[in-house]
Image (tube, rainbow, N blue to C red):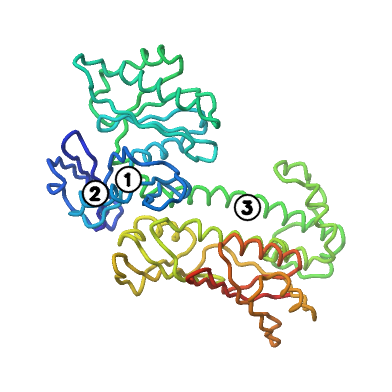
């Protein structure tokens, strides 16, 4: 049984929820109240939500700070000594994954199509605020204490309204600010009934709404991210689209073949139940969702029904699109690697992948990367796991790629080696494989986008990059090896 315990601060104590998933994917939740962190239960995976009131969001790289990633493009920077203190506080949990209120707010902000709002979270006597741009990049953040500082206790709604007003003023003083259209206030505590959102709305002159949020459940949702469910829905929609396009291409292909008397030259036994006499009477207007003119132009350039059959049933694509597909697949793999996993070696094959990784936390792979890889491969598992100083190592094997493979025709050129030498940087090794007309390339890049540019340049010169593509992290650069066909 796979279990995750999520712990959050609650006043002077802690509240913990253990999520356990059994083999039938049923989830059991158990709640605990703890006076100290040592009283909290320990699971296979442990997650802690800390205030992080001293953290800096999206700070540039700087020595003296440790970085915690909120998602692929947003991060928290914490002074190393402060980070060590936080780690020491939770050392009983064996290197838990650390979350912040900004994780919660960003997850909520991403669910809103209209990003022109201020998202706020009341948590542990603090008010956290963020604003994001259309790309879900945090462009503003604030954290304000709600603890009483005077003798007279101010009503909580007045206190929140004042803090929000200060936060909005800070936001408008930024050069990249926009007009705040609404405010969303989320609360995990027990003060909902004492907050008058109408008073807040009247004071700020901005539409405001208070909602409760289950932080334990939200963190669990972030960890799972519903990746598989989202993917299955998208896959079903894509299948419908493919069915429509396939049907349109098939009928138009048969119609074209009939018009040009191809039905007399070939065996149509596979279409024996289709009455080709009726194909002439098909109204192309009935396929309103298909760009018929573009299909007409495409089929006008095809010389035979065999070519039509290939277009309908094959996965052949042009050279430019072939390289673009490989580049996108590479980018997909690098983008899905979370920031607490480091790639030492990476092998990308036509229908699989192998990743030699260093994990900051032992659970890094199982909490995030595993589910992402399962979207694209039928088999995903680890081998050769071990410990490396304070970190962990694992080799991740991916087999049986779910997407189709593509191919293009080869066009051999005598000047290939000379042209390739002008594409790759100095120091690149290029070896000719005359038997299969391939060229082996071993080159070096400082960043992966440099390789993407090389792939683009290969496409411009009518070259195909071929699998396997192998990456190896070195001290000052990244070694990349692959084959090229002309």
Density class for disc 3 (Cα within 10 Å; few <14, some 14-19, many ≥20) is few
- For marks 2 and 3, the one nearer the N-term is 2
Report which residue position mark 3 lands on: 243
Density class for disc 2 (Cα within 10 Å; few <14, some 14-19, many ≥20) is few
Left/right of residue 23 with respect to residue 263 in the rendered view: left
Q: Do the residues bearing badges 1 and 3 touch, measured as CB atoms within 8 Å?
A: no
Say which of 199 and 257 sits in front. 199
Left/right of residue 56 with respect to residue 462 in the rendered view: left
- For marks 1 and 2, the one nearer the N-term is 2
Q: Residue furthest right?
A: 260
Distance of label 1 from label 3 (alpha carbons): 43 Å
**Element under disc 3:** helix
Left/right of residue 253 with respect to residue 194 in the rendered view: right
- Give the image location of residue 119, x and y in percent: 41, 30
Above or below: residue 453 compared with residue 19: below
Q: Residue furthest bottom?
A: 435
- Give the image location of residue 228, x and y in percent: 43, 52
Give the residue drawn at x 78%, y 66%: 307
The residue mark sitting in front, 1 or 3, is 1
**Element under disc 1:** strand
Residue 437: image tag: none
Above or below: residue 334 compared with residue 400: above
Distance of label 1 from label 2 (alpha carbons): 15 Å
**Element under disc 2:** helix
- Give the image location of residue 266, x and y in percent: 79, 70
Report which residue position mark 1 lands on: 99
The residue mark sitting in front, 2 or 3, is 2
């Amino acid at each position: 049984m796979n279990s995750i315990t999520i712990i959050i601060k609650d006043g002077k104590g802690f509240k913990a929820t253990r999520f356990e998933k059994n083999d039938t994917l049923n989830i059991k939740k158990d709640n605990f109240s703890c006076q100290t962190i040592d009283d909290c239960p320990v699971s296979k995976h442990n997650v802690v939500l800390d205030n992080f009131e001293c953290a800096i969001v999206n700070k540039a790289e700087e020595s003296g700070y440790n970085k915690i990633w909120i998602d692929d493009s947003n991060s928290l920077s914490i002074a190393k000594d402060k980070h060590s203190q936080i780690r020491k506080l939770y050392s009983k949990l064996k290197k838990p994954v650390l979350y912040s209120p900004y994780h919660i707010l960003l997850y909520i902000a991403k669910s809103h199509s209209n990003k022109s709002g201020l998202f706020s979270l009341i948590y542990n006597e603090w008010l956290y605020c963020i604003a994001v741009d259309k790309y879900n990049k945090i462009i503003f953040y604030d954290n304000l204490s709600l603890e009483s500082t005077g003798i007279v206790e101010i009503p909580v709604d007045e206190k929140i309204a004042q803090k929000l007003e200060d936060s909005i003023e800070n936001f408008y003083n930024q050069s990249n600010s926009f007009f705040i259209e609404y405010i969303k206030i989320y609360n995990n505590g027990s003060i909902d009934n004492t907050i008058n959102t109408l008073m807040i709305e009247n004071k700020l002159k901005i539409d405001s709404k208070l909602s409760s949020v289950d932080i334990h459940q939200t963190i669990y949702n972030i960890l799972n991210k519903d990746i598989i469910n989202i993917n299955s829905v998208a896959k079903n929609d894509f299948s419908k689209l493919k069915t429509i396009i396939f049907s349109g291409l098939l009928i138009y292909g048969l119609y074209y073949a009939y018009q040009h008397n191809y039905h007399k030259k070939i065996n149509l036994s596979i279409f024996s139940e289709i009455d080709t006499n009726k194909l002439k009477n098909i109204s192309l207007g009935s396929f309103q969702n298909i760009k018929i003119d573009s299909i007409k132009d495409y089929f006008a350039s095809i010389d035979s029904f065999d070519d039509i059959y290939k277009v309908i049933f094959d996965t052949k694509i042009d050279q430019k699109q072939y390289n673009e597909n490989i580049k996108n697949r590479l980018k997909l793999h690098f983008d899905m690697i979370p920031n607490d996993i480091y790639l030492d070696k990476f092998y990308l094959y036509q229908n699989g992948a192998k990743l030699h990784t260093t994990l900051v936390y032992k659970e890094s792979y199982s909490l995030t990367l595993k589910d992402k890889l399962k979207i694209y491969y039928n088999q995903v598992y680890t081998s050769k796991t071990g410990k490396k100083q304070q970190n962990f190592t694992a080799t991740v094997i991916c087999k049986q790629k779910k997407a189709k493979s593509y191919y293009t025709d080869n066009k051999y050129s005598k000047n290939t080696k000379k042209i390739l030498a002008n594409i790759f940087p100095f120091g690149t090794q290029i070896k000719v494989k005359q038997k299969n007309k391939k060229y082996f390339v071993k080159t070096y890049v400082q960043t992966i986008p440099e390789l993407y540019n090389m792939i683009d340049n290969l496409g411009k010169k009518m070259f195909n990059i071929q699998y396997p593509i192998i990456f190896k992290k070195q001290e000052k650069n990244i070694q990349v090896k692959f084959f090229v066909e002309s």
